[in-house]
Amino acid sequence: MNNDKSAVTVEKNESLLVDEFEIIELEDRLELAGRCNGRCDSQVERSVE
Amino acid sequence: MTQPARPLANPLIEVSDFDSDASKPMVMCAVPDGNDAVRFALPVAYMDLVREFDGVRTIDEAIDAFLQRGQGNFERDWLRRLVEKSLLPKGILIHADQDASRAGVSSQPKRAFLFIKLPIIPPSVVEPIARRLGFMFKTPALVLGLILAVLSHAYVYGVLLTAQRVDLSQLDATGVLAVMLLSTLGTLCHEFGHASAASYYGCRRMTIGWGVYIIYTVLWTNVSDAWKLPRRQRAVVDIGGVYFESIFLLLTLALFLRTGDIVFLVAFVIIDLSIATTFNPFLRMDGYWLMSDFFGIVNLRKQQMLWLQHLGGKLFGVKESGPKIDLTPKAKWVLGIYTALGTLFLGYILKVIFQFVILSIAKEYPALLRAFVQAAGEGAPLIELLKAFLEVFWRSLMLAGAAVTLWSLVTRTFSLLGKLRAFRAQVRHSGA
């Protein structure tokens, strides 16, 4: 049983989300937006100076 | 004696036309998984086959009925494998004793492509707000928003910033925290922009959350239901975030003009920098989805891997090297160029990780950590303590994100090398 579980994990990590029958699992549409942290601070200093 | 299986089409699946640049007509099939749904794009002919399964016919009888209709050029054995290896495991077809509402099985990791993924605002809160804001996507509101965005940027960069120099050293701890808070609020508006656009076109089940992507802390909105929309509407959902964030910028500008507080002007510029980043098509941000929707290439990053796999297969003379890429020639060209440029961008990201995260952040990290511990020990004012904590916190996330990204790259490289070895072995074997 454990072997089955690890097989599924490997499949999940490496899956190209398309099978041999050309059925595509559509990836989760997560619309990301970066938010400011300290990195923005140094960027803005460089960009507006 | 074992009774032959008599599967049926999952009665709870939602089927809609799927708008992509695939070379054959496709449908989108959403299979409930108990929480949301797992969505599949499949050729239209497969759904005709699925409809032949009524829970009374055996698999062979349903396939016969499909073949008698003369739809497509399929072999019986191939269709049987399609049913047993794909349609049943995915929950598109189910057995009579199976729970149809939990039949969908996904092969994606739960946290998708993020290093950390935490839902923070559930659909029950997001949807009512998004519905009320949907009017912002009517044409007059969109045109007005665009005009105001252009004018505000012209005024800030053409007038205000030429008149005064903005320097973060002008800000004290409270000011820096205020800028970070405004930036977070702007990003939250951005996410509600995506959700509102999706809601305007009839999508549901949008969740907003927080996460870490490569080395960036991000907010995200799950708008997976938008896969059912035509490409043009999906593109509006992609733009919706920047549209709402531009409106937030108007508010920031208004507050600067009213109070003269430099914090609001700095926040305006910082939020603009985030907007510029979001259009990068090689990061999985708005630019990625825009490119995917504009060219109709679904799962862009995965298709890229497939393309590389095929290229490797061709180089080693292997004809069948994994699943096929079903795209029009134009989309294949776009994918090729995207892959080449994406590889260059990967080099850039590695340079950033090395120069910024490893050389800079890792170097200053112990001193900042000591400063935070010292501030906490000496009972520093709360605002100073909070700033010291945030300085350590975001650097910790970046270091962890960089470590995970590098580890993932190493494992993927080994996996690719393994595949290349397998290709070589296959070629040698077929040669012998």
Image: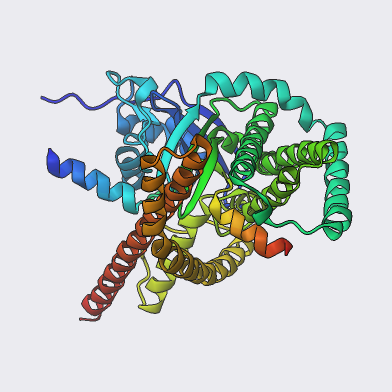
Q: Residue A6 appears in which quarter of the rendering?
A: top left
The colour scheme of the drawn protein is rainbow
Q: Position of residue B214 (x, y in %)?
A: 45, 54
Q: Residue A35 appears in which quarter of the rendering?
A: top right
Which quarter of the figure is the N terminus of chain B placed in?
A: top left
Residue B202 can be seen in this image: yes
The residue shown at (62%, 48%) is B286
Q: Position of residue B421 (x, y in %)?
A: 26, 73
Which quarter of the figure is the C terminus of chain B placed in?
A: bottom left
The residue shown at (69%, 33%) is B197
Q: Position of residue B131 (x, y in %)?
A: 68, 22
**Left or right of A32: which side holds B88?**
left
Return the residue found at the far left.
Answer: B1
Answer above or below: position of B336 versus A25.
below
The residue shown at (84%, 36%) is B258
Q: How many marks?
A: 0
**Left or right of B414: which side holds B65?**
right
Answer above or below: position of B353 versus B183.
below
Residue toward you, B79 or B89: B89
**Left or right of B195: which side holds B119?**
left
Q: Position of residue A37 (x, y in %)?
A: 55, 49
Answer above or below: position of A18 versus B132.
below
